[in-house]
Image (cartoon, rainbow, N blue to C red):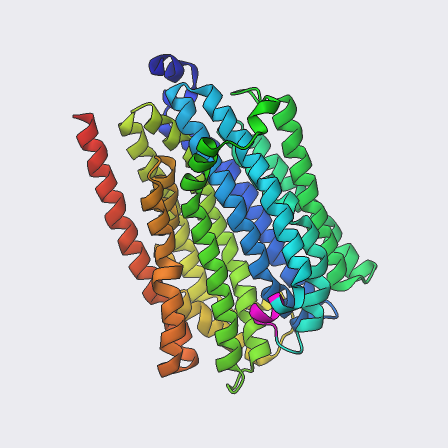
Amino acid sequence: MTNDVNEANPLGYEKISKLVPRFAVPAVISMVVNAIYNMIDQVLIGWSDVGMLGIGATTVSFPLTTIMTALSLLFSVGCAAGFNLNLGKGDNAKAGRIAGTAISLGVIAGTALLVVSLLFLRPMLVLFGATEAIMPYAVDYTRIIIFGIPFGILSTIFSSLIRADGNPRYSMICMLSGAAFNLVFDPMVLFVFKLGLKGIAFTTSFGMVITAVMGAAYLLKSFRAVKLARDFFRIRFEEAKTTLSLGLGAMFNQAAMTVMQIVMNNTLRVYGENSAYGNDAIISCVGSINKLNMIFISVVVGVGQGCQPIIGFNYGAKQYDRVKKTYRTSMIIALTASLAVFLVYQLLPRQLLSFYGNNPDAFFDFGTLFLRIFMLMTFLNCVQPITASFLTSIGKAQKGLFIAMTRQVIFLIPLLILLPRFFGLEGILFAGPVSDFAAAATGIVLAFSEMKNMTKLQQ
């Protein structure tokens, strides 16, 4: 049965050198365009009437976006991994049940997050690090963007399933359509209609709706691997367990990023208040850099997600040489991108920050330090996410979860709390490279261990 499946599916026989670009490039493009949109969003706000405080508002509301993304990854990564592993084994019915269960769970989770966020909006923003000056802008922005949450979760699940179905190009088109809507209408709502942050929030939410609707249309009419019967959408314990276990690593990685952002914002607020820079400038500056860094992270994550169907299918089909070659290829691509970004951060920090408008000198001075010190180990930042995606793709959920937690939970968050007590703002800056190096080293050890296991399985 497995051999027949391999012969029918290009994932099982086509050259890895052709498959990786075919699947990774669309995933990278779709994620990078969305990251660029988020950065341009900040740039436009920086040049608008609301300026630096508007940037601060989107910064303190960003943890809510990462919570949404964490839930999206829990269902989408777990669903795609389980879907492809079962396709590789030839169990199409179970693959379909996993897909339907993940979609139903996404609807429930998205609706729950929307309701909770509306009920506890102001306390939530205080927790996220909003200062007194930033709070009114943050409320205006977040109150509207909340309504896009269910569609954002579903659009991520749909895109992962479309890639798993062997159509990364349409998955890319879905993601690009929502981003394109935002890129066209954001300048209009800011500079023509003068709607400020409320207008930006509306276009962002509607962009999520567009992507979700396009993804749903594909699954209903064009899904090739499995016909999604109505019964597949009934939540089953076994399929839910498979999805959640395989998606926990990606979710915890993103959830840890949320906690890290909250800790970072509050640490900056406390230690920046009496500094030469001021906490409003520091929070806005770091938020801008994080949006900028999302472009790089999107490249790495896109490579990992693009390779996931190839790795999962071939591991399920016991073609371990193809699994190892795909991992090596994805790591080479990601390392090349990481080195290029590292050089830009070190050589052109002030030029990058100048995109965000005519902000105070404190914004540029601290931003330059942050890019050159906190981001010092950027060239190694690809190891952890690529390895976490690899481990999840082969069904090693616990190892994937562990490596996903290394950078933020095990290393960075404790360092952000501990080092500033002794070194003030400088402690925050040095927490970045220390945690990045430790996470990369851990990822390398786990990857080599798994490669040895696959070699033994081949004997």
Residue 125 colored in magenta in the image: yes
Identify whether 305 is placed above or below 142. Answer: above
Q: Is residue 115 visible?
A: yes
Q: Which residues are magenta?
A: 124-130
The C terminus sits in image quarter: top left
Q: Residue at x 61, y 52 (%)?
A: 113
Please state which of residues 171 and 346 is positioned toward the viewer in this rendering. 171
Where residue 86 sits, quadrant-wise, is: top left
Where residue 108 sits in the image (x, y, percent)? 61, 42
Report which quarter residue 209 is drawn in: top right
Residue 4 lies, in percent from the top left, at 37, 12
Q: Is residue 330 above or below residue 183?
A: above
| Residue 328 horizontal side relative to residue 46, left or right | left
| Residue sitting at x 65%, y 52% | 114
Q: Residue at x 34, y 41 (%)?
A: 391
Q: Give left or right: position of 163 versus 398.
A: right
Q: Is residue 80 above or below residue 52?
A: above
